[in-house]
């Protein structure tokens, strides 16, 4: 066996393990070791925090959605942090002041994480829930999230985000499939302990466990990791539903994925002690498998691409690998050029999204190595 063959098969095994082997390993572990969540009817005081920057198109509907939740109104507070908005977002929020909605203006603009720190200093709820400015909760979402906090071991709960694709784009359909896969992983991870990552649009934490974060840190990743480091659990509640539109342009999705991956690399670096086998053992295995090896998957993808070409004449398996990659990467290019193609949606949504996400991780890793950080964000567009 040549060196190129060894590299090819090791790289291929890396990819296969991350996307297939890890879920199988979790399923096997859950057959011999389980940590059920002792959820029950539970109605503590809750503060919902919504961070917004120029969200005039969505903020009123989002606030009304939270006011209409199936949860005792006298036990619910809502805080909106406007991060230097200039489009009238603040005036719309002030229109809900008579219903107890509080506006905090962050000036100058400092980003979402700084805004959350500001809001948590004024939150009164025992539980603090987080919502994006365009996140629409299912009516029972908050009640179902909070029920998990009846278990004293639970410190953080994430709900089920469902991406909808009203335009039928290749990127949107691929993103929806990707989230179904992620939600399956979170169910398995909850069975054995804690989930590794959350989305941030339908989440909640015990206020006593919240620790202020640096403005450059990704709250959707750093905060759950800190909760786990404190000894509490982070669990997934599939009954707490949130629907959000996907991005329908590959360029928009790519930029968003680069930003998230870059901040995730820094989060992993800041929380690197959790990657040690002791004392975290099982969670360290999960963190390596679900995040570190996943975010670095562009490396074996590159190795498979190069070695499969070098091994073209060594057998049909290598020819097939080359052809498959040409089709996958070609689909990405076509997805950018023809974003609403029904044909591409049927045959290429998932491979196209797979390539796009991992290309974004590759660029983010390069920026991470250069020491770049990102603090500010723009509203997500559908």
Image (tube, rainbow, N blue to C red):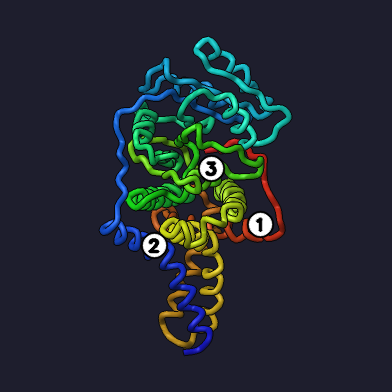
Residue 111 in the image, given as x and y percentages of width and height: 65, 36
Q: Is residue 27 left or right of residue 166?
A: left
Q: Mark 1 points at which residue?
A: 368
* Residue 112 shows in the view: yes
Q: Report if the CB atoms under discs 1 and 2 are less than 8 Å apart.
A: no
Q: Name the residue under label 2.
A: 22
Q: Is residue 354 above or below residue 120?
A: below
Label 2: how many Cα within 10 Å (few below 14, some 14–19, many 20+): some
Helix, strand or loop at mark 1: helix
- Number of disc labels: 3
Toward the viewer: 308 or 156? 156
Q: Report if the CB atoms under discs 3 and 2 are less than 8 Å apart.
A: no
Residue 76 in the image, given as x and y percentages of width and height: 45, 20
Q: Earlier in the sequence, mark 1 or mark 3?
A: 3
Q: In this view, does 32 lie above or below 98?
A: below
Q: Is residue 168 above or below residue 82?
A: below
* The furthest residue to the right: 108
Q: Mark 3 points at which residue?
A: 223
Label 1: how many Cα within 10 Å (few below 14, some 14–19, many 20+): some
């Amino acid at each position: 066996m040549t060196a190129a063959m060894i590299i090819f098969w090791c790289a291929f095994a890396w990819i296969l393990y991350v996307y297939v082997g890890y879920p199988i390993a979790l399923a096997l572990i859950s057959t011999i070791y389980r940590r059920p969540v002792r959820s029950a009817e539970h109605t503590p005081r809750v503060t919902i925090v919504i961070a917004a920057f120029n969200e005039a198109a969505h903020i009123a509907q989002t606030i009304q959605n939270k006011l209409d939740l199936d949860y005792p109104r006298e036990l619910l507070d809502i805080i909106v942090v406007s991060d230097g908005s200039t489009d009238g977002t603040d005036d719309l929020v002030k229109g809900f002041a008579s219903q107890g909605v509080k506006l905090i203006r962050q000036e100058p603009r400092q980003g979402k994480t700084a805004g959350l720190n500001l809001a948590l200093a004024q939150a009164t709820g025992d539980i603090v829930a987080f919502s994006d400015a365009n996140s629409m909760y299912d009516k029972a979402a908050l009640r179902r999230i909070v029920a998990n906090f009846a278990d004293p071991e639970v410190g953080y709960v994430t709900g089920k985000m469902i991406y909808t694709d009203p335009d039928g784009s290749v990127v949107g359909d691929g993103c929806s499939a990707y989230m179904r896969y992620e939600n399956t992983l979170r169910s398995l991870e909850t069975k054995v302990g804690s989930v590794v990552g959350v989305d941030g649009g339908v989440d909640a934490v015990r206020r006593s466990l919240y620790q202020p974060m640096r403005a450059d840190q990704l709250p959707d990743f750093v905060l759950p990791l800190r909760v786990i480091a404190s000894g509490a659990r982070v669990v997934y509640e599939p009954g707490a539903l949130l629907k959000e539109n996907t991005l329908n342009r590959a360029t928009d999705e790519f930029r968003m994925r680069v930003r998230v991956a870059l901040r995730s690399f820094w989060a992993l670096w800041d929380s690197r002690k959790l990657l040690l086998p002791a004392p975290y053992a099982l969670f360290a295995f999960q963190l390596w498998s679900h995040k570190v090896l996943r975010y670095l998957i562009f490396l074996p993808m590159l190795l498979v691409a190069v070695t499969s070409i070098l091994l073209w004449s060594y057998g049909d398996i290598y020819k097939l690998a080359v052809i498959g990659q040409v089709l996958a990467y070609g689909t990405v290019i076509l997805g950018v050029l023809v974003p609403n193609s029904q044909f591409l949606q049927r045959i290429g949504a998932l491979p196209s999204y797979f390539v796009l996400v991992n290309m974004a991780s590759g660029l983010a890793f390069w920026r991470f190595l250069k020491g770049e950080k990102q603090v500010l964000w723009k509203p997500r567009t559908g």
